[in-house]
Amino acid sequence: MYPYQITSEEQYTNDYRNSVENPEKFWADIAQYFSWKKTWDKVLSADFEKAEVKWFAGAKLNITENCLDRHIEKLASQPAIIWEPNDPNEHYRVLTYKELLFKVKQFANVLKNNGVKKGDRVCIYMGMIPELAIAVLACARIGAIHSVIFGGFSARSIADRLQDADARFIVTCDGAFRGAKDIPLKAIIDDALESCPFVQRVIVCTRTHTPVSMIKGRDVWWEDEIKIVETQGNPDCIAEVMDAEDVLFILYTSGSTGKPKGVVHSVAGYMVWTNYTFVNVFQYTPGQIYFCTADIGWITGHSYLLYGPLSAGATTMMFEGIPTFPDAGRFWDITQKHKVDILYTAPTAIRSLMAYGTSYLEGKDLSSLKVLGTVGEPINEEAWYWYYENVGKSKCPIVDTWWQTETGGIMISNLAGVTPHKPTYATLPMPGVLPCLVDETGNELADNGVSGNLCIKQAWPGMIRTTYGDHERCRQTYFSTYKNMYFTGDGCLRDKDGNYRITGRVDDVLNVSGHRIGTAEVENAINMHQGVVESAVVGFPHDIKGQGIYAFVIFNGMHVDEEHTRKDVIQTVSRIIGAIAKPDKIQFVSGLPKTRSGKIMRRILRKIAEGELNNLGDTTTLLDPGIVEEIKSGRL
Ligand code: WT7
């Protein structure tokens, strides 16, 4: 039990009320249970007009002392991380709290030896191996800012991010195992660095033994650097004293326009928020095995594989592979083998496993499971019941957790076994979260039983602080649409009892298999192909991915044949962004529906992509209404 754990519906109601009526007192009471080098001067100061928010200003701390050192006395030999490899025949690894702390200090010293200092940006591009967790925590130990890039992004995407953050240090692997694939991470980094001459050091951890080229003076092996630290003798690494509002990390995420932005989170608020939400949403009990299937390259991995669980002294599972390798029973094998208590995954994973049928669940002992969770996208009713009945055996509450990269942690969710679940609903706000629904003109919709755009009216500790290098972009994107509110970009329904149901993005952002992709980004990538004149990208409902990517492309080049051109365009997108952004459908068109002022009418394209051909709305303002008929008849 944690002192701030909510154990009944009444307590939830009470705590919720206190948290919104007197947030400073509420969060100060919780924050006292963390380890500080100096406590705060002021709990909260917020100015949404300027997008300026500070939590625990004046306080000093280091998040790794909260995640590691402070647990050593009681939990030294408890597993902190249990790592399950891609190949089930390889042995799993266990890192106790003591071992993890030792390795984090050791690698922190490697970083220091290589010239990394407080405030420096370190890009981490690795597969899901324990060294990834170690690298992240080692950065936090010395106050370096980590920027983890998911292994599915291309060299070009990496280069954009390195340049944006002016990151001079990289930690990577020779390669990564993912299912039957072997991703040549170091080779991709080498490509990225062609356009990033400012990078001083690349530290390469061995995993796949893929041949790599090591550039003299720039590239070093992780293992060699560890040996150097060992010969230096002093295994300690004193935690850097950080200000509460110092930057902890940057994580890039897509928006409706332009290039991905670097979402910035700061140390103290993020720590308190991820810990508090982890403990309460999952109702974690010390000793339990908690399995979050997300990759650390996404915010879910940051908040609920690493920082939340570790700061709570939990045992967190880390899985290198994919749900369908070697077969679609892998999650259940892992659950049985490690007696997983809590499983947190994405609707897209559930739907893909559901498509394989229940035979992969047969004979698997899932009796250790107590709580199930979902994150990243709306869950459809069918997938919800499949998860509830077949995985949870109708005994485990499901927490449907709504949040975003920008929110740092869970914002709307039921609390497992404490507040009721409701299929397809995220249900109720976490203490500290004041959601509201607004209509297009910004009027608040105060009643229950309404739909609108979801905003948050009050600052919470885990919220975004800025977008790296461009604060104005942060203000514009999140705080300027509606006055004095944070705008989420999501549409939402509130039922008669006040439960929230997220219906999906209302901006030009797609959610493909729980991954966030901007339509503008995909269009820019498609337009890089030399034969492409123009393109428009929209989402369409996809049985497994939630949303698929539908591209309408005006092509002026030479077709060998259409199928071939399609593959070329897909290859281009893979090169520019990464495989996760590949269009599912590409329709070649001779024109796009545009207004007289030249704006593409995406509403029409969206309807066509969704198959709603007879309900396209007003098309009379189009420059060339005839084009709509052509597009309709060529629909894929
Ligand atoms: C977007 C944020 C949250 C971590 C992973 C994704 C959608 C997220 C839910 C949910 C319905 C959800 C929203 C949100 N989303 N959770 N439980 N139900 N939709 O983080 O990449 O920043 O994406 O994911 O549309 O805005 P992200």
Image: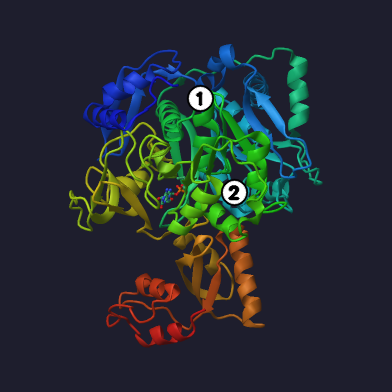
Inter-mark Cα distance, 1 to 2: 29 Å
- Asked whether the viewer can see residue 2, the reply is yes
Which label sits in the foreground, 1 or 2? 1
Residue at x 39%, y 40% (from the top left corner): 407
Of the two numbered discs 1 and 2 on the same chain, state the one appearing first in sequence.
Answer: 2
Residue at x 76%, y 40% (from the top left corner): 207
Indicate the position of residue 23 as horizontal and vertical percent values.
27, 27
Q: Is mark 2 within 8 Å of ligand 1?
A: no
In-front residue for pair 77/512: 77
Indicate the position of residue 618 as horizontal and vertical percent values.
27, 79
Q: Is residue 491 above or below residue 91?
A: below
Indicate the position of residue 526 as horizontal and vertical percent values.
54, 67
618 with respect to 103 (left or right): left
Q: Find numbered disc 2 in the image and state the secondary structure of the residue it sits on.
A: helix
In-front residue for pair 179/587: 179
The disc at residue 311 is 1
307 with respect to 245 (left or right): right
Residue at x 39%, y 83% (from the top left corner): 628
Q: Residues within 10 Å of mark 1 (few under 14, many from 20)?
A: many
- State which quadrant residue 428 falls in: top left
State how the image is colored.
rainbow
Q: Residues within 10 Å of mark 2 (few under 14, many from 20)?
A: many
The disc at residue 259 is none
Q: Find numbered disc 1 in the image and state the secondary structure of the residue it sits on.
A: helix
Q: Amino acid at mark 1?
A: Ser
The disc at residue 158 is 2
